[in-house]
Amino acid sequence: MEGLDIRHDSNLYLQEYISTLENLPSEIQYHWAEIQKRNEQLEELERHIHSRDNNLSKIHRQVMNSTETKADALKNEPIIIRKIKRDYDRIQVLADEKVQIAEQALKLLDRHLRRLDNDLDKVHDDNRNESRNESRSPQSMMPTRQASPINTTLKLPLAEMIGEGSQRKRRRANSHISSGRSTPSIRTRSRETTPSRGPRRQHAPPRHGNDSDSQGESDEPLYCICQQVSYGAMVACDGENCPHEWFHYDCVGLTAPPKGAWYCEHCLAEMQEKKVKKLKRKKD
């Protein structure tokens, strides 16, 4: 099944791409709600720690003024300290989960923008090749030659309306996530942002048409386990090193956008293998 020819079906491609974004706001809202839930749990744990710290202070004051032996007065101190330590450990876990959720939301946005950037780059390359071939052709000097409507069609809905804005959105999204990683007084996990993977250039099967079309098609990125171009509804794998990145719904048996993180079979197998190796190392 062949995808849309962006050069000749720019309006249809734009509608199809926008349709893939229809579920994006709800997915981002889901990630935000999960972060807010953990914020509420963090606030509750901080209140518990503050209350138990006050109890320790009271115990120490009673030791100074009490006639009881020091051992009797401090018998509850170890229990309170263990509870405070348990609360701090839980805070660390919640802080790490917040970072992971934020990274998942960023990857979700980044993959949608990267898909559009790759397709726009292909369009620009094709247009440059066509312009170069037309300038070399003797027919380009004929006064009856009319300007191609393709460039005009693409310029407004794609290149200007979306292409330039996508780069600004990606930089803005990265800056927001990077600025919100650290939690005061809590040791959080440090993790470098994984650089965006560039498009995997693979030669597509030869297509019938003029030379400029064949030259442009050779740079079109291939996705999914079927190794075809992007078309229709697609879902992005949240695996950090996924070899395919995007998958057609039909190829992975989906009929609707998945909620939360989604992993392909390849990445699920790798994750399971890592868990098994980790358990073996612990036993050794």
Image (cartoon, rainbow, N blue to C red):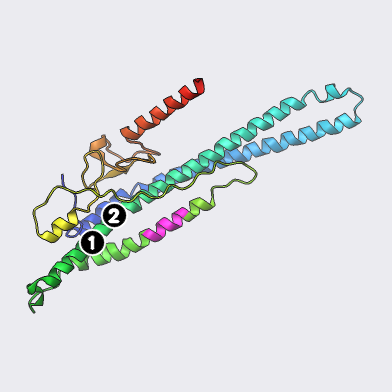
Instruction: Check disc 1: other Cα within 10 Å, few if <14, some if 14-19, many if 20+.
Output: some
Left or right for 36, reference 210:
right
* Residue 183 x, y percent position in the rendering: 59, 45
- C-alpha separation, residue under disc 2 versus residue under disc 1: 11 Å
Residue drawn 14% across the image and 58% down it: 213
Left or right for 259, reference 122:
right
Mark 1 secondary-structure assignment: helix
* Residue 180 x, y percent position in the rendering: 54, 50
Residue drawn 43% across the image and 27% down it: 275
Q: Is residue 5 visible?
A: no
- In the image, farthest residue toward the front: 284
Mark 2 secondary-structure assignment: helix
- In the image, farthest residue toward the bottom: 143
Q: Amino acid at mark 1?
A: Asp
Residue 171 lies in magenta, yes or no?
Answer: yes
Per the image, the residue denoted by label 1 is: 125
Q: Amino acid at mark 2?
A: Asn
* Residue 212 x, y percent position in the rendering: 14, 61
Instruction: Check disc 2: other Cα within 10 Å, few if <14, some if 14-19, many if 20+.
Output: some
Residue drawn 77% across the image and 25% down it: 76
The quadrant holding residue 186 is top right
Q: Nearer the viewer, residue 188 or 281?
A: 281
Residue 3 lies in magenta, yes or no?
Answer: no
Per the image, the residue denoted by label 2 is: 118
> Which segment did they paint magenta?
167-174
Residue drawn 35% across the image and 46% down it: 23
Left or right for 150, reference 22:
left
Quadrant of the rendering where the N terminus is positioned: top left
Left or right for 61, reference 8:
right
